[in-house]
């Protein structure tokens, strides 16, 4: 199976928990070798992908929905798990689409019933860290006179739900051109080549220093970074040079992304 980035992490994990329970525990299990359960795990993941795609919402789920997803899916597979699990069709998302659609319909109809009764289940407690991402880069060139900022280091596949906030930390080491006098480097954090933050600047002088560290942590506003499968980048550019027109280098850079619930 290829790498999958959930639309809604909690929906995906709740569906997988139900599927693995139904597929993997048809009765007493006594096998202590974890690798023997790989077929059940991968088939359950394919079902969870289908379920997440049908659910198709980044909205934070309620306590009831979290419980219902796992329970309904587990019961769907109880005493009627697929087989033989070696059949590769069970590891495809398309194979489970009809079943996943039916499970989602049942839960959403329950949501509609509660809403009609004026009942609103509390949100699922997701306080704390929801997702992290980290990347490093080396020897990235900042081109002299470039109008558009250079993505120095990027983190991919970040999902930010409606109740999520992004905290990004971009740091690195800049190497000013040896032939220059004063150099001003601008840096920020954003998506693509667009800034999500203000541009910070640092002044370097190759006559005084060989390298210069920089660091910037930015906490996004609520909803500012909301969306699925996003790429966040540490951005930099040459803002000004006092002498010749040379490129410069970011010898090392890293970007850490944390998605926390609010």
Image: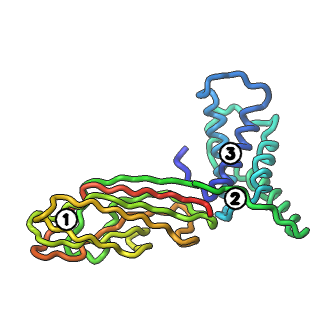
- The mark nearer the N terminus, 1 or 3, is 3
Q: Secondary structure at mark 2?
A: helix
- Between marks 2 and 1, how big is the CA–CA gap? 48 Å
Q: Residue 141 at x, y = what percent? A: 23, 62
Q: Nearer the viewer, mark 1 or mark 3?
A: 1
Pick the front one: 238 or 3: 238
- The mark nearer the N terminus, 2 or 1, is 2
Pick the front one: 110 or 53: 110
Left or right side of 27 for 261: left
Question: What residue is shown at x 34% (from left), y 72% (from top)?
Answer: 200
Left or right side of 213 for 19: right
Quadrant the N terminus occupies: top right
Disc 3 target residue: 16
Pick the front one: 121 or 99: 121
Quadrant the C terminus occupies: bottom right
Disc 1 target residue: 248
Tag 1 near tag 3, CB within 8 Å: no
Q: Quadrant of residue 128?
A: bottom right
Pick the front one: 124 or 150: 124
Question: What residue is shown at x 66% (from left), y 53% (from top)?
Answer: 10
For label 1, the crowd category at 10 Å Cα-Cα, with few meaning under 14, some 14 to 19 and many 20 or more, is many
Q: Residue 96 at x, y = what percent? A: 70, 48
Disc 2 target residue: 54
Q: Residue 144 at x, y = what percent? A: 19, 72
- Between marks 1 and 3, how big is the CA–CA gap? 48 Å
Q: Is residue 22 above or below residue 233?
A: above
Q: Secondary structure at mark 3?
A: helix
The label on residue 207 is none
For label 2, the crowd category at 10 Å Cα-Cα, with few meaning under 14, some 14 to 19 and many 20 or more, is some
Tag 2 near tag 1, CB within 8 Å: no
């Amino acid at each position: 199976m290829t790498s999958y980035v959930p639309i809604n992490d909690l929906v995906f994990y709740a569906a997988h928990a139900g599927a693995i329970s139904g597929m993997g525990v048809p009765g007493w299990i006594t096998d202590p070798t974890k690798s023997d359960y790989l077929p059940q795990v991968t088939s359950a993941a394919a079902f969870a992908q289908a379920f997440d795609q049908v659910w198709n919402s980044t909205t934070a789920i309620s306590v009831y929905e979290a419980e219902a997803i796992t329970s309904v899916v587990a019961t769907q597979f109880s005493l009627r798990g697929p087989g033989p699990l070696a059949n590769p069709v069970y590891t495809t998302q398309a194979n489970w689409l009809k079943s996943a659609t039916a499970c989602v319909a049942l839960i959403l109809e329950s949501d509609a019933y509660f809403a009609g009764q004026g009942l609103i289940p509390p949100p699922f407690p997701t306080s704390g860290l929801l997702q992290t991402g980290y990347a490093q880069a080396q020897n990235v060139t900042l081109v002299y006179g470039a109008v558009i900022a250079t993505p120095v280091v990027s983190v991919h596949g970040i999902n930010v739900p409606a109740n999520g906030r992004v905290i990004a930390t971009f740091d690195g080491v800049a190497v000013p051109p040896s032939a220059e006098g004063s150099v001003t480097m601008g840096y920020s954090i954003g998506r693509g080549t667009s800034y999500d933050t203000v541009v910070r600047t640092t002044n370097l002088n190759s006559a005084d220093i060989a390298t210069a560290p920089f660091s910037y942590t930015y906490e996004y506003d609520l909803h500012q970074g909301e969306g699925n499968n996003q790429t966040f980048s540490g951005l930099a550019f040459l803002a000004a040079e006092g002498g010749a027109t040379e490129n410069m280098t970011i010898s090392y850079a890293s970007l850490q992304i944390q998605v926390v619930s609010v």
